[in-house]
Image (tube, rainbow, N blue to C red):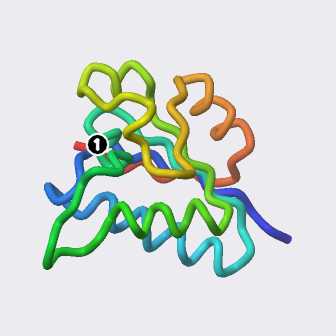
Amino acid sequence: MPKSLCLIVQTAPYTSENIDTAIGLAEAALDRGDKVSLFLYIDGVINANRLIDAPGERQIGAKLRELAGRGMAVATCGPCSRFRGIAKDLHFEGASMGSLVDLADYLDGADALVSLGF
């Protein structure tokens, strides 16, 4: 029976491996047929910026877009995004600018939670 995993990432890309850990967990869960949701919070919202380009590095944005295309729900904290200058039109395709209400919905439907932060 498929399960549901909620991931919360609170850190920016390329500063720690939190988003990489979330990506690995999401890939494994989706491969098993599980439902996955990702909430980007605090500096984690920077991961949703479609303009990030890191030549020679791992392509976090492309990987997140791929996972969203496989069915992973992705929402960012709207106020956190706005405070960091990341308007809705800067989010990659498949990511929505949301609120803590989205997080509450993700948590309500989750069988497991992994929070990756400071």
User: What SS does tag 1 mark?
Assistant: helix
Judge whether 44 appears above or below 57 on screen: above
Question: In the visual, does 104 lie left or right of 90?
Answer: right
Residue at position x 14%, y 55% from top? 15
Q: Position of residue 93 (x, y in %)?
A: 52, 51
Q: In which quarter of the image is residue 112?
A: bottom right
Judge whether 1 appears above or below 6 on screen: below
Question: In the visual, does 111 lie left or right of 39?
Answer: right
Residue at position x 22%, y 43% from top? 118
The residue pinned by badge 1 equals 46
Q: Where is residue 60 in the image (x, y as percent from the top left)?
A: 32, 65
Judge whether 59 appears above or below 102 on screen: below
Q: Residues within 10 Å of mark 1 (few under 14, many from 20)?
A: many
As rendered, which of 77 and 56 lies closer to the eye?
Answer: 56
Question: In the visual, does 5 lie left or right of 97?
Answer: right
Judge whether 102 appears above or below 75 on screen: above
Q: Where is residue 116 in the image (x, y as percent from the top left)?
A: 35, 50
Instruction: State the count of labels.
Output: 1
Q: In the displayed orientation, state which residue is furthest to the right.
A: 1
Q: Where is residue 46 in the image (x, y as percent from the top left)?
A: 28, 42
Residue at position x 53%, y 39% from top? 75
Residue at position x 26%, y 37% from top? 43
Image quarter where the N terminus lies is: bottom right
As rendered, which of 51 and 71 lies closer to the eye?
Answer: 51
Please state which amino acid type lies under the numbered disc 1.
Ile
